[in-house]
Image (cartoon, rainbow, N blue to C red):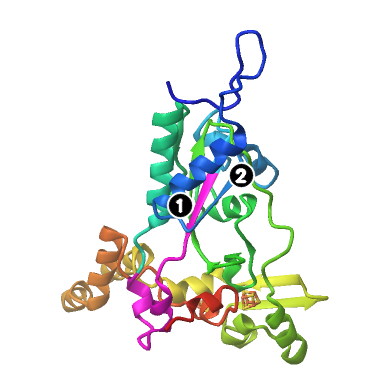
């Protein structure tokens, strides 16, 4: 019989042999780390209630959910960030190991511990918003905090990570949210004090046609602006959104030659490849993260 969390004996006393919550939590985390995750954290399912409305909470997808186990991975390798061919970043390293790790953890929880577990739904089924926010999950699991650059959740050790999660009815020990904001980094505060901009603001300034702006006082973000729509038109031109744009062009024109030009274009092929394989050209701009100092020291290799 698989071990259970918080097991009691018939007379109500504690079962000496039952693994405690810390042990069980560490066991699940180790499963995630051994199966592709770079970091794993745990949030309590009820912690979401304070931040998101009904319909976007773990219990909306799994009644009785108690824990959310979050896995993060860095995507492209450190060398890919340094490649002189910037487009390499679009197409390498997106093997979604964080999703594999969350599936393996879910299977482990179900088969070894007998609790319900499943991958959290991270992608929109309609509209722009995901059913469950992986960004919020990462923050609640103590894996990072929100950055000025593109609202990304920055991990203090690794910087930009991609996140996925497992929902489960299994009680686990939640991690604490990070006490200190990862962003702005100390060097960014110094640059802001001298130039009025941080590296990410300098590379994509909202007041010069870019997407990012913020104010910082006493080392803390006091206001932050991110033009998500403008960023999407620059960084997400291939894949589902690009495909929809091209279908609109196709239905809007009666010119048969123009239709053929669109259909046989490189962009049309790339969009379809992105939709079909969810792999090619995940994004076309990483510049705000390329200049971000958080985790950059890890990219220095021989
Ligand atoms: S991804 Fe590119 S376009 Fe979007 S905010 Fe960052 S630098 Fe700007
Ligand atoms: S460059 Fe600095 S200010 Fe911008 S996201 Fe990174 S840490 Fe934050």
Mark 1 neighbour density, 10 Å: few (under 14) some (14–19) many (20 or more): many
Task: Specify start and end residues of the magenta stretch as a single range.
Answer: 69-92
- Residue 107 placed where, x, y %? 39, 37
Q: Nearer the viewer, mark 2 or mark 1?
A: 1
Q: Is residue 268 above or below residue 290?
A: above
Quarter assignment of residue 240: bottom left
Helix, strand or loop at disc 2?
A: strand
Left or right of 196 in this view: 88: left
- Which residue has dot 2 on it? 43
Which residue lies most toward the bottom here? 194
Would residue 21 be visible to someone looking at this image?
yes
Q: Is residue 53 above or below residue 208?
A: above
Left or right of 230 in this view: 212: right
- Residue at image location 60% in from the left, 53% down from the top: 136
Would residue 121 be visible to someone looking at this image?
no
Q: Are marks 2 and 1 in contact (CB under 8 Å)?
A: no
- Residue at image location 50% in from the left, 51% down from the top: 130
Quarter assignment of residue 211: bottom right
- Residue 8 placed where, x, y %? 61, 17
Q: Earlier in the sequence, mark 2 or mark 1?
A: 1
Mark 2 neighbour density, 10 Å: few (under 14) some (14–19) many (20 or more): many
Which residue lies most toward the front here? 16
- Residue 173 placed where, x, y %? 63, 39
**54 part of magenta stretch:** no
Helix, strand or loop at disc 1?
A: helix
| Quadrant showing the N terminus | top left
- Which residue has dot 1 on it? 33
- Residue at image location 77% in from the left, 87% down from the top: 193
């Amino acid at each position: 019989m698989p071990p259970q969390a918080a097991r009691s004996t018939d007379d109500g006393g504690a079962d000496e042999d039952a693994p405690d919550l810390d042990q069980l939590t560490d066991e699940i985390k180790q499963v995630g780390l051994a199966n592709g995750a770079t970091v794993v954290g745990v949030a309590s399912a009820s912690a979401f209630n304070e931040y998101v409305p009904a319909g976007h909470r773990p219990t909306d997808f799994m009644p009785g959910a108690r824990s959310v186990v979050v896995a993060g991975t860095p995507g492209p390798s450190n060398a890919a960030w340094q490649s002189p061919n910037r487009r390499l970043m679009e197409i390498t390293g997106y093997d979604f190991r964080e999703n594999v790790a969350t599936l393996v953890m879910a299977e482990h929880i179900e088969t070894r511990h007998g609790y319900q577990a499943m991958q959290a739904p991270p992608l929109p089924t309609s509209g722009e918003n995901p059913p469950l926010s992986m960004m919020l999950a990462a923050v609640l699991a103590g894996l990072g905090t929100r950055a000025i650059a593109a609202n990304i959740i920055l991990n203090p050790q690794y910087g930009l990570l991609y996140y996925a999660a497992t929902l489960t009815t299994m009680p686990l020990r939640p991690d604490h949210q990070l006490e200190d904001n990862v962003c702005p980094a100390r060097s960014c505060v110094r640059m802001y004090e001298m130039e009025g901009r941080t590296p990410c603001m300098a590379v994509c300034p909202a007041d010069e046609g870019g997407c990012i702006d913020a104010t910082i006082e006493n080392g803390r973000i006091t206001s932050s602006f991110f033009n998500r729509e403008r960023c999407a038109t620059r960084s997400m031109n291939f894949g589902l959104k690009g495909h929809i744009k091209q279908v609109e062009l196709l239905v809007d024109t009666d010119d048969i030659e123009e239709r053929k030009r669109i259909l046989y274009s490189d962009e049309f092929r790339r969009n379809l490849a992105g939709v079909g394989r969810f792999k090619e050209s995940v994004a076309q701009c990483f510049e705000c993260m390329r200049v971000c100092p958080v985790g950059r020291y890890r990219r220095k290799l021989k």
